[in-house]
Amino acid sequence: MSDANSTISIRSSELSDPMPDPAGPVEPGDLNQQLLTTSVWTDEMVQAAGIPIVDVPLVSVGGGIGSYVLANHLRIAGMPTSHMRILSNLDVPWQTYEYLTQVSQVPRKERLRSDAQSMPDNMWGFPSYAFREAWADKKIGPIFNVCTEPVFRDYYTPKAGQVFEAMEREAARMSYFDMTVKGQVRMTRRRYGGGYFTILTPPQGQSATKRVAYRSTYVHFSVGYPGVKFLPDLQEYRSTYDDYVRVVNAYEPHEQVYEELKRRPGLVMIRGGGIVASRVLQRLIDDRDQYGLQTQILHVFRTYVTGSHGPSIFLRRKGGDGWAYQGFNWPKSCWGGHYKFKFEKLEGDARRDFYKILDGTNTPIRKNWQEQLARGRREGWYRTYVGAVDSVVPGADGTVVTKVKAQDGSLLEVPAHFVIDCTGLESDVREHRLYADLFDHSNAQRNVLGRLAVGRSFEVEGTQSAPGTMYAAGTMTLGSYFAGVDTFLGLQYAAVRIMDDLASRGFIKKMGPVRSSTQWLKWARNKELPK
Ligand SMILES: Cc1cc2nc3c(=O)[nH]c(=O)nc-3n(C[C@H](O)[C@H](O)[C@H](O)COP(=O)(O)OP(=O)(O)OC[C@H]3O[C@@H](n4cnc5c(N)ncnc54)[C@H](O)[C@@H]3O)c2cc1C
C-alpha cells in the first residue's frame, strides 16, 4: 500500500525556510500551460514564459550527501566551481541526514552504523575514521578496537559528529557553497536540441521571477527519501482518533515520549526489528538505567527470528531472540565483492529474485545492547510478541490497545501508553514530485523493484537527451545494478561511476593514479582546491 495517507513528511523539504509552490494565476516568469503539458521544451517556449535561463554544464538536484560526494569527486578530478550548480532547499548537505539520525536516537555523540569503508569527505578511505579519532583525541582505543574486532569488540564505527565535522572541513576546501543555489526544484524536462531544463523556485523575495530555468547538458538527482512510510494500522489510528502524541514514528521528533516516561512509569510498544528499533530500545533502556525509571517495553515482531536463517548454507544470516543480525544493510560483498559483480550481470526477474533473497530487516549486533535486552528479558520488563497486528484502538486510562493476531489465530490485546513505529522510510518513488514528472514526461522507467531504473553508470534509463545525460543516485534507485545505493559507500560508488562516465563524454579529464595520489596529499594538508 502506498498512498498519501500512508506516508508522512520527513520535513526534508521544510528543514530550511518554507518555500511554498503556490498554484494561482500565471504571472510572468512562471510555468504556463504550454510548458506544463509539453514534454520536450524549446528555448523559445521558456523565454516566452518570461523565465530567466541560467546556463551551466551540470546541475545536481538535492544538495544532500549524494550531491556533496559527486561535487567532491568532480572537484578533485579538476572541475571548476563554475561548471556545476547544486539546487537544494538545504543549508548544509548533512542537514536531512542529521535530522533523521538525531530523531532516530543517533545524536552527534553516538556512533553510526557504517564504518570507514566510506567517508563522504574522503574519497580514498584513508586514513580511517578510527585512526582520525585516535589522532584527534590522542587515544589508542579506536585503533585497538579495529585490531581486535569483531571477535573481542564490536565493529568500530565513527560518531555522527565526527562525520559532520569532517564534511564541513571538506566543503570549505572544495568551495562547495560557491556551487549551491537555494530553492525548491519543481521539475526537469528534456530540451529540444539536447540537454535539460531544470526549473527552480527560489525562496520568496530572492528572485525577480517566480521561477528560474537552469539549462544544462547533464543533470544529477539525489533527493533522498520522499517520505516516511507509516504502518497502515498506525496511520489509520492516528487519523481516526487524531492522536499524534501517543502513536509516533521514530523518524518524527518524539522526545515527548522519553520525557513523559521520566515523569511517570509507562508501557511502550515498539514495532519493527531494524537498526532504528534497536537504537530506540537502547535509548529507553539507557534512560531506565540512568534515571531509575520503571518503563516496561513491549516489542511486536511480525517475523520472529530464532537463529541463523537463509535458503542455503552459503546464504545465511545470523539471528536470535526475534532479530536478524547483519553488520551492514546488505551483505558486505554487495559493495565490492562477489555479489556486486553478480548484481551487475543479472537482468529482469533474476535480479529481482536475488534482491528478494538478500532482502530483509536486520540490525548490527552490538554487545552493550544485547546485554540490555537480555537483562530486560530476565527481569521481565522487556517482553516480545509475535504476530500480525489486526488493529489499533484507544484503551482505558489513556492507553493505546494493539490487537495482535498470533500464529495460532488467537487475538491478543496489548495496551501501551506509547507506540513507536520503527519500521522505516519506504515510500513509493512517484510520491516525489520530481520523479513522478520524470515518469510522466521524460520516459523514465521503473526497475525490477518498482523504483527508478538506472544503468551501470547511474544514468536514468530512457531519459537521454543527447548529448546530455541524466543521472540519479540514492535510495530511489534501489533495484538496479548496485544494491547498496542508500549508503555513504553507495553514494560514493555512484559518484565514481558518474565521474568516469562524464570523463568519457569529455566533461572532465579521467582521474588516474597520479592525480589521485597528489590530490590525496592536498586533502591531507587541507589545501584548498582551485576554484
Ligand atoms: C536514520 C538514518 C541513518 C543512516 N545511517 C547511515 C549510516 O550510518 N551509513 C550510511 O552509509 N548510510 C546511512 N544512511 C543512508 C544514507 O547514507 C543517507 O540517508 C544519505 O543522507 C542519503 O543521501 P541522499 O543525498 O540520497 O539524500 P539526503 O541526504 O536526504 O539529501 C537529499 C535532499 O534533497 C532535498 N530535496 C528533495 N527534493 C527537493 C526538491 N524538489 N528541490 C530541492 N531540494 C530537494 C531534500 O532536502 C533532501 O534531504 C542512513 C539513513 C537514515 C535515514
Image (cartoon, rainbow, N blue to C red):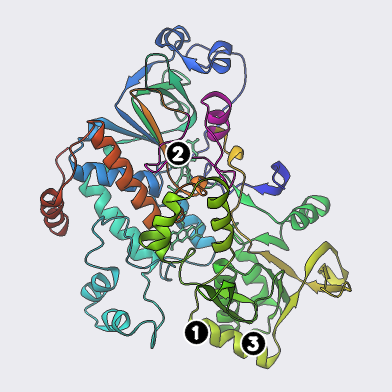
Q: Residue at x 48, y 10 (%)?
A: 49
* 240 is within the stretch colored magenta: no
**Residue placed furthest toward the bottom:** 378
Q: Which residue is identified by label 2?
A: 89
Count the marks: how many?
3
Taken as a whole, is the magenta stretch helix, strand or loop?
loop
The residue lying toward the viewer, choosing from 306 and 375, is: 306
Vertical comparison of 138 with 113: above or below = below
Few, some or many C-alpha atoms within 10 Å of disc 2 (few <14, some 14-19, many ≥20)? many
Q: Which residue is identified by label 1?
A: 368
The residue lying toward the viewer, choosing from 25 and 463, is: 463
Q: Earlier in the sequence, mark 2 or mark 1?
A: 2
Query: Could you give the CA–CA distance between mark 2 and mark 1, rounded to whole angstroms?
Result: 38 Å
Q: Secondary structure at mark 1?
A: helix
Q: Position of residue 117 (x, y in %)?
A: 33, 64
Q: Which residue is identified by label 3?
A: 376
Asked whether mark 2 lies closer than 8 Å to ligand 1, one says yes
Vertical comparison of 190 with 4: above or below = above
Q: Quadrant of residue 216?
A: top left
